[in-house]
Amino acid sequence: MLKLNVNNETSRLLAVVLGTAERNGPAPILEECYDPKSRENVLKGTYPTEEDMIKELDEFENVLLKYDVKVYRPDVINHYNQIFSRDVGFVINDCFIISNILPERSKEILAIDKVIELISKNKIIEFPEDCHIEGGDVILHNDYIFIGTFDGDDYFNFKTARTNYQAIQFLKKIFPKKKIISFDLIKSDLEPTKNALHLDCCLQPVGNGKLVASPDAFLKRDQYEWLIDYFGKENILEMSLNEMSEMNCNFFSIDTNIVVSEKSFTKLNNWLRSFDIIVEEINYKEISKQGGLLRCSTLPLIRE
């Protein structure tokens, strides 16, 4: 059985689920897009090919294997996007939580049944039907859980609103010892620079007490000010909305001093190296055209 353990984003990674682009299917038609970045690239005719995405995921897997990480891959479902494993579930402490995701993505959890079968049944948690949540909106920071949400009255008008207030309240009941902090994010189904699809698109802790964040992605300034007070302004690398939409906040930590990042993120990568963090630069630009990147592609199961 798997002994799950995840309490933060940066401790040494031991086991992870990494998404797959095998038999991903053709580019979606416009009506099938459920994020503005995918929509933008469908309109431009630049939606990524299956071949290119497979190459990028294989490059990512090779970096993980280099650091002796046990890598699980989903079973392949024909003509189904299974790249962003992060959203279908997540681990808090030693519990596996199954997300309530978009109906269009509901089959994705079935592709990791072989992993779920390795987890004790009493460690698996499912949300009530009225609780909407995806793993990209959940960021662990030791005693804290940061959750991205949107509490506007027009929540149901946005395909990009993925986590609701009910889910946050449910997590508070399940993990009463955790300090749960919610952040209201900007949403748009049409414009990538006006949309933070998930919290990990605009915020991520890194290293020892550092943070990368996009201030204008937060609807409520006082919520971002909380982050400044907690981390210290001198420890935060701020990203513009354009940089956020290019996924600069969505790197992935293998350890406090090892980060996997897109090779074109010069500003981010140089900043990380200034703190003696090893940056494993890889090609991931094609996958970014679907509104997700490195953290989105992973579902950590065990960290030290």
Image (cartoon, rainbow, N blue to C red):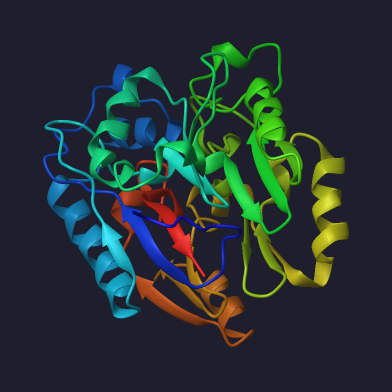
Q: Nearer the viewer, residue 14 or 29?
A: 14
Q: Nearer the viewer, residue 7 or 248?
A: 7
Tell me what residue is drawn at x 27 percent, y 41 percent.
Answer: 112
Q: Nearer the viewer, residue 152 or 206?
A: 206
In this rendering, the answer to whether 170 lies above or below 142 is above
Tell me what residue is drawn at x 51 percent, y 58 percent.
Answer: 5
- Residue 107 sits in quarter: top left
**Relative to residue 79, is residue 212 drawn left or right?**
right
In this rendering, the answer to whether 80 lies above or below 130 is below
Relative image position of residue 289 (x, y in whole percent): 35, 45
Relative image position of residue 113 (x, y in whole percent): 26, 38
Tell me what residue is drawn at x 80 percent, y 54 percent.
Answer: 227
In this rendering, the answer to whether 190 lies above or below 84 is above
The total number of labels drawn is: 0
Relative image position of residue 255 (x, y in whole percent): 51, 74
Q: Nearer the viewer, residue 101 or 264?
A: 101
Image quadrant in which the N terminus is located: bottom left
Relative image position of residue 145 (x, y in whole percent): 68, 47
**Relative to residue 200, is residue 89 drawn left or right?**
left
**Relative to residue 220, is residue 6 drawn left or right?**
left
In this rendering, the answer to whether 271 lies above or below 246 is below
